[in-house]
Amino acid sequence: MTILVSLTLAFIQITENEKLSLIDLLIRASITAKVVLIILLLFSIASWVIIFSKWMALRSAEQASRQFLSRFRSRLKLSDVLIEAENAKASPVARIFLAGYEEITGQMGGEGSIRSIEAVNRVLQSATIAEVSRLERSLGWLATTANASPFIGLFGTVVGIVIAFQGLSAATASSIQSVAPGIAEALIATAAGIAAAVPAAIFYNYLLSKVKSLTATMDRFGLELLNLIERNYIKADV
């Protein structure tokens, strides 16, 4: 930590004395530092694309699921809910209903009752797992970015410090200017790694909490649907 603070103070002194801009520092950076920064930039861009797309998708799923559940609970028959489910394309709960409804109609035929509630339960569980997997898709990239970016930035920091010492050993006279390029690379790489990791970590936890909330809603709906099926579609002597 002391070394990092010393490097930071030295970097500030360099920029004040030589009036270096960020662009100048990036242009002067070594190939290794540029590669590290490009990798971190790509990680960051991909993360923000995933953050915005998943946030909008989850918000739409929550709203559509609330509307579908409200209409589902106001209907007396499953057939009355079918059209509502087919129109609620953004709702994972509606898709679970459609999977269960297909199994129910397949079992009933013209008898008016189902043969196996366990089969319906398995279909609902399978549909729920599929929906959860779909909702969690791409979130792994945010976790990877949050975990890997600081280490990628640390690699750039180490390379920058090595270059700084090389510049110091090659200089005829020891001065802060001889280590300026290496210090700049080290600090920029560190900042870039943190800048890529922090938003990814924050939004990964936020979006994952949204997925867990929707998962709980789907589980509750599955139990509610099974109760409705037992009351209306199973014969009393079964």
Image (cartoon, helix red, strand yellow):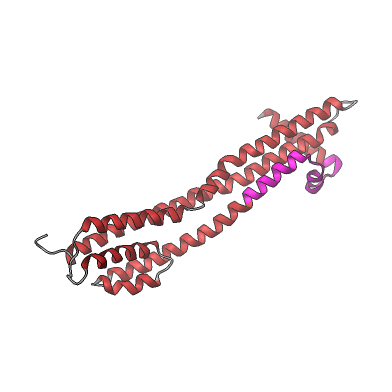
**Which secondary structure class fits the magenta region best?**
helix
Q: Residue at x 43, y 63 (%)?
A: 61
Q: Quadrant of residue 88?
A: bottom left
Image location of residue 139, percent across then percent down: 50, 50
Left-right relation of 67 to 120: right
Nearest to the observer: residue 138 or residue 204: 138
Q: Residue at x 52, y 52 (%)?
A: 138
Tell me if residue 49 is in the magenta stretch. Answer: no
Left-right relation of 185 to 197: right
Image location of residue 176, percent across then percent down: 83, 31
Q: Is residue 229 above or below residue 8?
A: below
Image location of residue 91, percent across then percent down: 40, 64
User: Quarter of the image containing the N terminus?
Assistant: top right
Tell me if residue 29 is in the magenta stretch. Answer: yes
Left-right relation of 63 to 18: left
Q: Residue at x 77, y 40 (%)?
A: 31
Q: Is residue 78 above or below residue 156?
A: below
Image location of residue 92, percent across then percent down: 39, 62
Q: Residue furthest right?
A: 172
User: Quarter of the image containing the C terminus?
Assistant: bottom left
Q: Which residues are magenta?
A: 16-44
Q: Is residue 33 above or below residue 117?
A: above
Left-right relation of 48 to 157: left
Q: Quadrant of residue 175?
A: top right
Q: Is residue 124 above or below residue 68?
A: above
Nearest to the observer: residue 70 or residue 104: 104
Count up the numbered dots: 0
